Image (cartoon, coloured by chain):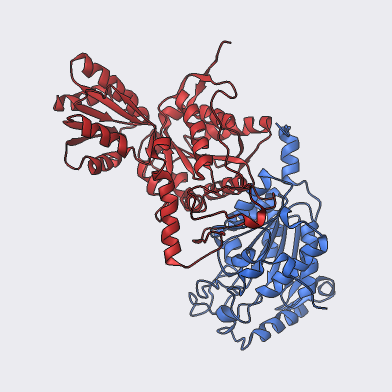
Chain colours: A red, B blue
Amino acid sequence: MAKKVDFMMGNHAVAEGAIYAGCKFFGGYPITPSSEVAERMAERLPKVGGRFIQMEDEIGAMASVIGASLAGAKSLTATSGPGFSLKQENLGYACLTEIPVVVVDVMRGGPSTGMPTGPSQSDIMQAKWGTHGDHPIIAVTPASVQEQFDETVRAFNLSEKYRCPVVVLTDAIIGQMMESITIPEPGEIEIVNRKMPTCKPEEYLPYDMSNYVNPLPPFGKGYRFHVTGLHYDETGFPTNDPVLHTKNTKRIIEKLEKSYDDIVKVEEFMTDDAEVLVFAIGVSARSAKHAVVEAREKGIKVGLVRPLTIWPFPEKHLEKILSQNKIKGIVVPEMNLGQMTLEIDKIARGRCEVEGLYSLMLDPILPADILEKIRRFA
Amino acid sequence: MAYDYSKYLRNDKFPHIWCPGCSYGIALKSMIRAIASLGWEKDDIVVTSGIGCVNRMPGYMDFNTLHTTHGRSIAFATGVKLANPELKVIALGGDGDMTAIGGNHFIHACRRNIDITVFVFNNSIYGMTGAQYSPTTPRGAWATTAPYGMPESNFDVTELAIGSGASFVARSTSYHATHCEKMIKEALQHKGLSVVEIVSACPTGFGRKNKFKTPTSMLLDMKERGVNIKKAEQMSDEEMEGKYKIGVLHKEDRPEHIETYDAVVGLEKGV
């Protein structure tokens, strides 16, 4: 059978990916350049038995998706920088209480109201550290309209599998551009649903400390558990015990660390014999790939490391290349003033040069500029 | 024979965190009697709360309970209800929680008329953080952040709810425990957004520094100033000076949000 090929906007592809993954609830608030996600969900959800609400603010939108998830609906919200800032407290709530939700952040120029219609990649650190306290988070970074779809499906799957919020970290270019996309048939991509308890209700522990991921029954199914943003014990009730607080905080962070191989997805392009690396995500990775191909034509041994998961940071992938290849330098093009570069510096530990290529110019970083940086190490 | 509350409580979670003389226990009992009298299944009930003393209440109640972030009780509850309208959803909070940091959710839930029952426990102060003034602290009253007396005007929670479009609005007090139970029961039965303001006493944070020598005197103040709406209608403005009405203050039939939404969008159920 011929595949169904569409010509679609990136933000709409996120919505379609969510529907494919089984999303039944969207709570959002209008913000450029993400509003098309909400618009598409408002239209599509009722057709698949789901509900949409435009909440009174970003904070309420984030709260509503957590509530809906606890009632058993896979839930999505979408926003951009300023709205992402407002969502952070409740995002932290979902991290601690381990409620699966997916948050789309279509990055625009910041800080503050910033550059509402201009693309940016300056929420990389906000996605990881925007909410207070030590916490786990997963962030995926699509670079095409097809990946907007695929990575949103993966975001839902990871969120359900690990009881952890997942951020789809995209930008105004990928979100707003149109490309062809193939929508897979139902069943073609595996859909993961959160684990349900098999024990009796009175034996159910929402936070069994000996498990990284515990089952999560929806409200109304007889389990009658308690959820709180205070640090809790295995039953879910508040505790002031610092030993338990330490143990549990480590547990929720380790649950991602221990599953690094399952969560962290990286495209390694021409890295086998590479002596120079380009490390890029999203729209910058498209330019980077172009530059790598051009450099290879000129005989430069360069490869591209393109994370589709930026949090947890693809440390093991980078470490492997650094230990196997004699890398002279890593070029990091990013549309901010060096957020990823800092992380890479930490991993390189002086073993090679790390050269950032930063831009706040609201246009994609050009392949020619990346090529020039590559040449420095050739 | 004494009323047995234990069926609806998580008995192993006691003693509670509230101060001696706090009136929240009385209100909790009123709520349990109201729920019990309706014969609702515990599994079907969801109680959400925000942050502050009263927001620890759901932890003691044997339902599906969700202790959220400050002010967001109604916003979380909105998601719960939309995801599963079969659930009976109660969102509770204090005066600061519901009318300051969560004020936006409060007024918009009223406007939407979503079928959630909201209880606002109004003790006129931020108790847990140490007696700072709230939007319901009376003008002139002492608070730790109003050491010279409250300089701002205060909200009337019920007027705010009525003005925002809630389809059921009532007020009761912790002194009027059986009346409170009746108001809660009516609110729970009402289809649409219902609000009950429960006038509450915080002897530790508010009473001590505002000329209430004992917790009892705060309850007696409720008895004195809370006037049943039927009686209040026959009283002059002068006679009502310094007093407030208790009872059902507003009730109307208005389309409920989810029913309306489902009809408007042609929701295809069971897909």
Residue positioned most to the bottom:
B213
Question: In front here: B56 or A367?
Answer: B56
Q: Residue at the spot x=18%, y=15% of the render?
A: A298
Q: What quarter of the picture does the N terminus of chain A occupy?
A: top right
Classify B157 as above or below A266. below
Residue B11 found in image quarter = bottom right
Classify B155 as above or below A65. below
Q: Residue at the spot x=67%, y=44% of the render?
A: B82
Residue B179 found in image quarter = bottom right
Q: Position of residue B198 (x, y in %)?
A: 70, 69
Drawn side of residue A5 relative to residue A373, left or right: right
Classify B60 as above or below B109. below
Q: Position of residue B77 (x, y in %)?
A: 64, 52
Classify A250 as above or below B222. above
Drawn side of residue B216 relative to residue A176, left or right: right
Residue positioned most to the top:
A2
Image mark count: 0
Q: Is residue B237 visible?
A: no
Q: Position of residue A120 (x, y in %)?
A: 36, 35
Drawn side of residue B39 relative to residue A77, left or right: right
Q: Position of residue B3 (x, y in %)?
A: 79, 74
Q: What quarter of the picture does the C terminus of chain A occupy?
A: top left
Q: Is residue A303 visible?
A: yes
